Image (spheres, coloured by chain):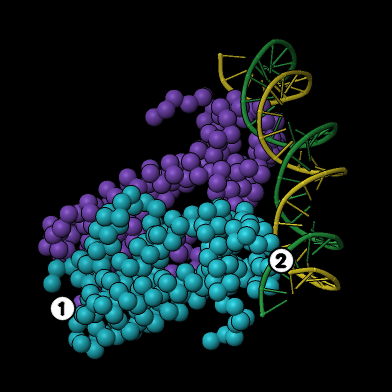
Chain colours: A cyan, B purple, C green, D yellow
Amino acid sequence: MVKRSNNDESRTEIVRSAKRLFQQYGYKKTTVSDIAKALGKVKSAIYYYFPDKESLLRAVIDEEIGKLIGSINDAVEMASTPEEKLKAYALTRSFEIRSLSTEYARFQEEYDELYPLVKEIHERCDHFERDTLKSILEAGMELGRFNKTDSEVLADAVLLWLKGLEAQLSSFGTEEALKEAVEHLVNVLLFGIKVR
Amino acid sequence: MVKRSNNDESRTEIVRSAKRLFQQYGYKKTTVSDIAKALGKVKSAIYYYFPDKESLLRAVIDEEIGKLIGSINDAVEMASTPEEKLKAYALTRSFEIRSLSTEYARFQEEYDELYPLVKEIHERCDHFERDTLKSILEAGMELGRFNKTDSEVLADAVLLWLKGLEAQLSSFGTEEALKEAVEHLVNVLLFGIKVR
DNA sequence: ATTTGACCATAATGGTAAAAAGGTCAAATA
DNA sequence: TATTTGACCTTTTTACCATTATGGTCAAAT
């Protein structure tokens, strides 16, 4: 754990305020003063807790990543078989990212400026995702339920496929449509299309 | 066929000039005068053949779509089995789109303005792609090589997956890496990951 | 230990005049 | 007749400047 200022509560309140405003107005359009005013303070109070605006954004993002990873982990652990875990992984990932991308819809307009940060986030998540997927796949192979292949390569392939789905998220009107698509794709992933 | 002006050669030369300059400088940054000057003419000469700048872009795009669809068709027809056709489809599609996105790299900076046109293109291609994929899949089912399911739903799923791959194209350093990824994904698509 | 307002440097914004662009057309060309 | 041209019009883009906002600092106040 990182050592923090005595008053951790102020930090979390500031992050909560920042989060709300970032979601509503985007990163650039919310000023540090806005974040402070929402707490009945003035911007220099913020700078007592955070070195700069970007670290506020990082704090918000860290929280969101934590929640995302937590949700996925929970869903995967809840499932019992490797097949179920894979399905849970794909569904949870897709739904959580979908809801994130609507909550932070304004960030898309600022993609150019936020790109370095986005890249960093992706790299950080990639690591977790590869590991999690790899262990699901390996468990399936151990149990003799999945074909034995290089689990790393396969994990990358599945991840590529999930990211592809992510890029197409906006094309799904309803949650139900997304769910059906994910389930269908998981089935194809599991069984292929060749007759057995 | 649309009725054209007598001198079709001028039209094609104008399109060629526009194509070259659009690739090099993007759509907005190439002026109609530039396109004309490259042919030793003045811009009003262009307007004798094309009603406006956008229709120049459309002509270029139509040509590129024609080539893209042609390449895919050729590759698919060349392959003999449904499995090979599927692989040929995925490989050719990925490589052709990859090369298009490098040739017209500047267009990404202008995404916002070109969006309506891009959407139109996608819709137009979607139709062809769905039909082609559907017929490959149906042929496979007829021959008893693919599991029988709703070919339309399956075609959409495969297409979704190919578009996902498309969104990740920039993450492949070499052509070889892309080829390997596509082949691996096609194998998963065909056989799934469950033991038989 | 926190909060504040005054302060600084830089970046965003608005307004404006000049330049460039898309597009039209009657006259010229061939 | 089929093209090409330059002059012309209107709208958009650019370049520039003054003003304002914003991110960030700091000594003093609480």
Q: Is residue B71 above or below residue B45?
A: below
Quadrant of the rendering where the C terminus of chain A is positioned:
bottom left
Residue A190, percent from left and from top: 23, 72
Tell me the tag on residue A44. Answer: 2
Marks 2 and 1, how far apart at CA = 65 Å
Give percent across and percent down for residue B73.
33, 52
Kind of residue at disc 1: Arg
- Based on the displayed image, in which of its 4 quarters is residue B86 positioned? bottom left
| Residue B65 vs residue D23, the one in the foreground | D23
| Residue at the image position 43 percent from the left and 79 percent from the top | A128
Residue at horizontal 37%, vertical 51%? A171
Q: Name the side, left or right, on which A58 lies relative to D23.
A: left
Tell me the element at label 1. loop
Q: Is residue B123 left or right of residue B86?
A: right
Q: Quadrant of residue B124?
A: top left
Residue sitting at the far bottom = A142
The residue sitting at 23% across, 54% down in the picture is B153
x, y (%) of residue D16?
Answer: 86, 44
Does residue B45 appear in the picture of this structure? yes
* Numbered tag placed on residue B196 in the rendering: 1
